[in-house]
Amino acid sequence: MINRKNAACVLAALFLVLARTASSTENGLTTYPLGVNTVLDGILPPPGATQFYNYTEYYFANKFSGPGGKSAIPDFHSEALVDAARVVHTWGGTLGPFTWSSGVVVPVVHLHLDVPGASGTRTAPGDIIAQPFMIGYSNPSHTFFAFLTNDISLPSGAYSVNRLANTGVNYYAYQPNLSMTWFPGPQWELSATAQVEFHSPNHATNYHSGDVASLDYLIGYSVTPKVQIGLQGYFLKQFTDDTVNGQTAPGDGFRGQTIGVGPQLRYDLGPGAAIAFKYQHEFAVRNRPQGDRLWVQFAFPV
């Protein structure tokens, strides 16, 4: 059993973490959901082109892992169904091998939570992510692509301090990240996105979530010119403490950690268009929900 002070801290962190999980692009986690960036991570539209992306994620968890990995909240259950639309435009002109792109991610979230003595369900917009300045690069042989961006998550999603299930987190997040894709051979793809996420306080609760670092990755192999199979996943580690009213959260500062891994299948529909299916199972989780993710992602030029 956990004492009432620790239970209050666990539940406060839980609401914020789950809302963050439910918000999309992503990758995120994090405001971007974890594991979103596993498909041609480093590639942006060519100059003058616009690309549409859609991410649909179903996340379910029947355990909230505490500091030692054991269940911290009895009878815990969460489900989140997220659909996020993303549009990226690359502006005309280049500076040598570099390009400039801008984008926006707009999620809609259905979230259900069960904790001892309480339950909540909410369907509403999540937090919008702005990507105003994305610097892209490709080498002359077009075997390596990368881009650096400084994303900003805006507290635009539905939120109430008195509601258990919220689709917004009620704070800003600054998310610098670097995405890369390398084709070491005609059939192989190695992609990764490394991100750090810094949070502002939630002034409605005086809870300040700690900062996190995450990595999404893919090792992909094309079995035909149109079909790719792969192993993908993510890793997240929180590196600063959560605080409540300016005081460090009990125990280990409620620092989160998780690892997820699973298979991926991608089918190319045509130039610039593809659909991907993937599954991710979580383990080695600390101070977070522990569950599984199912994804359908597609993209096409517009």
Image (cartoon, rainbow, N blue to C red):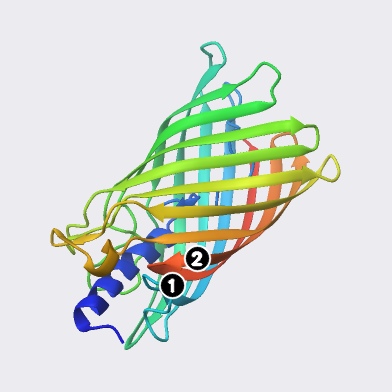
Q: How many marks are shown on the rendered structure? A: 2
Q: Position of residue 293 (x, y in %)?
A: 57, 64
CB within 8 Å, label 1 to label 2 = yes
Relative side of 153 to 298, left or right? left
Q: Where does the image place residue 240, in percent across and percent down from the top left?
A: 29, 52
The residue wearing badge 1 is: 69
Q: Residue at x 36, y 63 (%)?
A: 17
Give me the residue at 30% from left, 64% from top: 254
Q: CA distance from mark 1 to mark 2?
A: 7 Å
Q: Foreground residue, 159 or 227? A: 227
Q: Camera-side residue: 49 or 221?
A: 221
Q: Position of residue 138 (x, y in %)?
A: 61, 22
Question: What residue occupies the far right of the structure in this picture?
Answer: 224
Identify residue for label 2: 284
Q: Out of 180 and 127, give the one closest to the viewer.
A: 180
Residue 181 left/right relative to 128: right
